[in-house]
Image (spheres, rainbow, N blue to C red):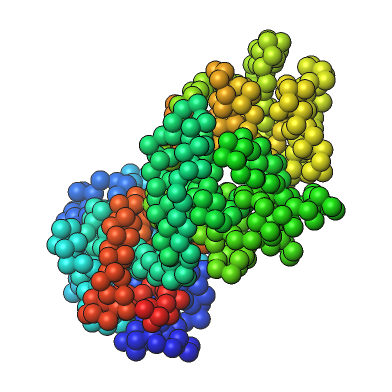
Amino acid sequence: MTEPKGRPPALFPLFSDVDTLPGIGARGRAALSQLGIERPRDLILTLPTGGVVRRRIDRIADARPPEIATIAVTVGQHVPPATRGRPWRVHCSDGANDLMLVFFHPRKEWIESHLPTGARRVVSGKVEIFDGLAQMVHPDHVLRETDPPLPEFEPVYPLAAGLTRKAMAKAVAAALTRLPPMAEWIDPQVIAQRGWPDMATALHRAHDPQSLRDLSPDAPARARLAYDELLAHQMTTALVRREKRRLRGRPSRGDGRLRRTVLGSLPWPPTAAQRRAVEEIAADLASDRRMNRLLQGDVGSGKTLVAMLSALIAVEAGGQAVLMAPTEILARQHARALEPLARAAGIRLAALTGRDKGELRAQLLEDLAAGRIDILVGTHAVFQKGVEFHDLRLAIIDEQHRFGVAQRLELSAKGDVPPDMLIMTATPIPRSLAMTQYGDLDISILDEKPPGRQPITTVMISDQRFDEVTARLQRALDQGARAYWVCPLVEESEVTDLTAAEARFQSLRARFGDTVRLVHGQMPADQRDAAMADFAGGRAQLLVATTVIEVGVDVPQATIMVIERAESFGLAQLHQLRGRVGRGQGASTCLLMYHPPLNEGGARRLTTLRDTDDGFRIAEVDLQMRGAGDVIGTAQSGLPRFRIADLENQSGLMAVARQDARALLERDPTLESPRGQAIRLLMWLMSQDEAIRLVTVG
């Protein structure tokens, strides 16, 4: 295996092939590979997942079956199997009581050599009572009395086919002997405060737990090792962030006149959270470093206003801003929502999507290049060749996870100096995950709702009361209400989801007549827009939809949301769907219609949603239920796979690591100090090779 340039030679033994360890041959290597273990380094970071308590007892009579016990016995008579498929039995005794050892698929030579009649042996395994006699099926250990004693608590590792507990323990012990001497990389204050051991001690203790308590994430050895992983990761994101901030931006300082005009035109003042976010963005725009900021806000927290005020700073400074949305519906909706604010400010806002063609498009592009358009709203059509800005200062991307990194970089290349970037997401992400996934971005959080947002009454109702639901809906529609009806996720196939949505549309159309429309992801864009326009304009009252309406559809007059088979949706998705109502003056209701009986997960998701509308609280429950990778989709998130750290339970450590990493880089940008050198070793150990290349740039 060739070593990457720069890896310290002290680490070479830990990064050699795993089959260089004693007892690991080709089969063992293949088995370890299934566990993601390729090198001794992976092995030392694979900690026990459980433990077996082995109680030492002096007499068989002291056993408390069924329990795992260790006892010294005298080996008596062997009873080989009379017929094929029967077990081999060995009678043993402690002098007062008997213990039967039972072996299925016996290997005669092994049994006779390890358990000769008349010898004293220490056996350990599960003691059970069978036909009134104590027995032990396949003892875990058969030892001489002179062998080292067995521990009372034995660690249990994850295993794969072809790998025994014994082989794993032996391989781990051998891997630990390859640890080089390492200087301390954690801040001495953190070590002292938390009472953590040094890394080598922590590894030895974590692999040799004395009780179940030592397996808990809070045990000092485990907490320290988790912190090492988080610190290496946060050093990497801090270095990437520094690299991004190295990109020179252009200071954009607004004089505030346009913002004052727009705020004066609003029915109520912005929330404290909105004001704070705008101040943070304004400070970033005014600096000569390029902004990379994430604006994270719950459903209905007023991100659109923050985006508009941020765009106005760019316009006040003499430049332009672009707001990019993932879909045409969303882009046009943003344009509609922002148009009155642009009018109040006396500036020009235009929308550009893939549907704009011919003369209209040509004129729009000419005006954009000449600087006659101040704010452009569009889909990724704003990337295309021929779209030139006069002076693009700020790019705002809505719904970050729909855009790939490549597209973000493409947008950065627009203009001579890359524009400042503001990324908005309506998906509340628990703080620990935000630090992991967006560690390279600065984060502004909108955690309060503007006045005027109506609370939404959320009700769980069984689909056995379907007729009651449609009768209540009929009464509401007769009084002029508008409602969404979201169809279930049938399976991972859009085709099947579609069939379900079309069938439900037909049945509701038969019941409610011509005021029902259908939207789904497979429809041609113009048909979908027409159905949405009918609903927004009041020509339709009931919109049957798949989850295409999950993000950003804004019809303030809609006050009822029915989610059919609600238990088939994820928590975050349900929260987004519910957020489509409660946007206007009317009291709103969300009906979670489920198919009984609910399993435990389904019940917890629906009751959480019924009991709270705090998106961050909902996201925390979602994280506990599904784990980090699923919450943001590991494949597309680039979320690191931690071997020891547990984001669900150790988010506090992540925050400390983030602070520590940033502070260290401020003090020691090239990591040349003794602690900086130690951190470099940690990053090599944690395979953060990419980040180490960034250190040298300083």
- Expressed as whole percent of the image width and height from the top left, the position of residue 152 reads 22, 59
| Numbered circles on residues, count | 0
Q: Residue at x 48, y 35 (%)?
A: 263
Q: Is residue 290 above or below residue 343?
A: below
Q: Quadrant of residue 612?
A: top left
- Expressed as whole percent of the image width and height from the top left, the position of residue 76 reads 29, 64
- Left or right placement of residue 539 versus residue 3 in this view: right
Q: Residue at x 78, y 53 (%)?
A: 363
Q: Is residue 368 above or below residue 249?
A: above
- Expressed as whole percent of the image width and height from the top left, the position of residue 346 reads 60, 40
Q: Could one spot residue 187 in this view of the protein?
A: yes
Q: Is residue 64 above or below residue 196?
A: above
- Left or right placement of residue 342 versus residue 673 in this view: right
Q: Residue at x 69, y 60 (%)?
A: 369
The image quadrant where one finds the C terminus is bottom left
Is 563 or 588 nearer to us in this picture?
Answer: 588
- Expressed as whole percent of the image width and height from the top left, the position of residue 40 reads 39, 78
Q: Could one spot residue 100 in this view of the protein?
A: no
